[in-house]
Amino acid sequence: FVQYTRCRALREAGRPAQEYVPLLVRLLASGMAGPAPIAKKILEELLLPLLSEDPALLSAEDVMALMRYVQGLSADPLERVRLGEQRSEVQRTLGDCLSAAILRGPGLGGGGGVAARGAWTAPAQPRGVVA
């Protein structure tokens, strides 16, 4: 609960979402979010609204971890956390986040990636090789 409290404090202090959203995702993905009601609150009330507004908050690895977590919720036979009608909205939001992370490239700040490099060009022909 310490990490969750820390993230809430960052949020309430007006800090940028990039400082605490990845921590919340790792908290969920590692199974350390606590009881199901707290995990559901983190997912539905904190993460999804922020990710809907700015899909570029997470790295591709963090998005994939969150996708695995949501898939695990859906497959839970005890249905401890029910997404219900929100399931398609969650999947759409996570898909947007993954697309943004892939286009941004490695790391949170970007550098590299398809959007930063521009159009793809073919590699140069090695010397001495006849095509």
Image (cartoon, rainbow, N blue to C red):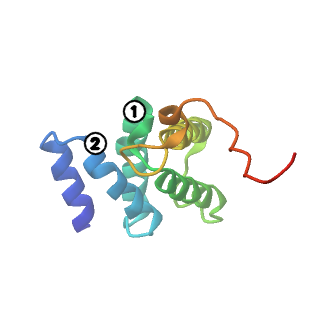
Residue 121: image location, x then y, percent: 66, 35
**Element type where label 2 sits in the image:** helix
When asked about the image quadrant of residue 78, the answer is: bottom right
Disc 2 vs disc 1: Cβ atoms closer than 8 Å? yes
The three-letter amino acid code for the residue at tag 1 is: Asp
| Residue 82 location (% of width, % of height) | 55, 51
User: In which quadrant will I find the C terminus?
Assistant: top right
The residue that disc 2 covers is 17
Tell me what residue is drawn at x 60 percent, y 61 percent: 72
Residue lying at 56% horizontally and 53% vertically, measured from the top left = 67
Considering depth in this image, is 93 or 122 the residue closer to the camera?
A: 122
Q: Is residue 53 left or right of residue 75?
A: left
Farthest-out residue, front = 128
Question: Does label 2 or label 1 sit earlier along the sequence?
Answer: 2
Q: Residues within 10 Å of mark 2 (few under 14, many from 20)?
A: some
Mark 1, residue position: 54
| Quarter in which the N terminus is drawn | bottom left
- Rendered residue at 23%/54% (across/down): 7
Task: Estimate the x, y position of residue 77 in percent, counting from the top left.
Answer: 65, 65
Q: Residue at x 73, y 52 (%)?
A: 127
129 left or right, relative to 67: right
